[in-house]
Image: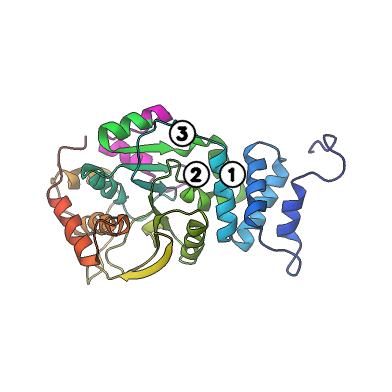
Amino acid sequence: MPDTTMFDGEHPFAQYVRILGKGKSGSRNLTREESHQAMRMILAGEVEPIQLGAFLMLMRHQEESGAELAGFVDAARESFTLPDDFPRVDLDWSSYAGKSRRLPWFVLSTWLLAQNGVRVLMHGAGGHTPGRIYTEAALDALGLPQAESVAQAAEQLEARHFCYLPLGVFLPRLREILDLKPLLGLRSPVNTFTRLINPARAACTMQGIHHPGYRDYHQEATLLLDQPRMAVIKGDGGETEWNPDMPNLVKSVIDGEARQEEWQAIYSRKHVKGELDLGQLRRLWRGESEDEYGIGAVVGTAAITLHTLGRADSHDQALSLAREMWEGRDKGGVG
């Protein structure tokens, strides 16, 4: 049983559980400040396990608001700091969902952008949902390292314009909460707001979601957080990856303005799903095999990113630039 002798009366965290759980007529979303304080207590270890479980599942039941996501990010950012001399990052890329039906082609998109001078910091966490291929495995297959410390991430950014920084390195408490999914049976708000943390405060962020309705929450939170540029897409498997067989509605924030625009499908026919052979990522990059769907996913995802970065003024220009980058890639750049 929880130790209730440490305080007089009600536990300080109980108010946040009550706000979310008072029933259909009495419950409400938290304000940004309330969600900030609630997550601050969670990250500081000031809540009981039973309170944490109740809070996470009540929040999951009614879904997070943009203000709640922004407050959670506020608390997360307060709990860690990167060194003042950490390299500049152009593009923040979150990767928390994993893939179950197709290969993680987006990893090649980020590597392609890095080869063309875009400094990319990817952060994520794998293994919390069985049966999925996570970014860590894709990086291993490509012979690309993962940072084991913030200092190592800085070195990799300087050397390659790319690094993958695991959530467990810079916010281990959030990683622990992600790992509760098999116990709780459902994802939690942590799966959502980790995508928004942007640990290096890059001017541009790319986010992928599975449920289309979450695009609005990400866009709202981005505006509240004063993030200059962001795009959120319904990504394949929930990762930031465009399925080139389908049109994609992109919701974005550009210099404080909320926007949305639909990108037309690259291909007019649907492709059959191939085998989940991670070696195909390396072979496609090195020109040792062909995969029309894979190339479309890599190029299309890179094009949406280039447009969000402001490096292309139109969809056609972005796609043309991404194709040029693909054709001119250093094929020996992976293991």
Q: Earlier in the sequence, mark 2 or mark 1?
A: 1
CB of mark 2 within 8 Å of CB of mark 3?
no
User: On the picture, is 83 further left or further right than 25?
Assistant: left
Quarter of the view holding residue 69? bottom right
The local secondary structure at tag 2 comes to loop
Q: Measuring 21% from the left and 34% from the top, which residue is drawn there?
A: 335
Q: Which residues are magenta?
A: 127-152
Placement of the N terminus among the 4 image quadrants? top right
Q: Determine which of the numbered discs, if any, sits on residue 302 in the image.
A: none
Q: Measuring 78% from the left and 38% from the top, which residue is drawn there?
A: 2
Q: Measuring from the top left, give residue 330's x and y in whole percent.
A: 15, 41
> Closer to the camera: disc 2 or disc 1?
1
CB of mark 1 within 8 Å of CB of mark 3?
no
User: On the picture, is 142 further left or further right than 153?
Assistant: left
Return the residue at label 1.
75
Q: Measuring from the top left, give residue 203's x and y in whole percent.
A: 38, 49
Vertical placement of 15 versus 153: above or below? below
Q: Measuring 24% from the left and 66% from the top, which residue is drawn there?
A: 314
Q: CA distance from mark 2 to mark 3?
A: 25 Å
Disc 1 crowd, CA 10 A, few/some/many (<14, 14-19, 20+):
many
Three-letter amino acid code at the position of disc 3:
Leu
Three-letter amino acid code at the position of disc 1:
Ala
Quarter of the view holding residue 308? bottom left
Q: Front-most of 79 and 171?
A: 79
> Closer to the camera: disc 2 or disc 3?
3
Return the residue at label 3.
82
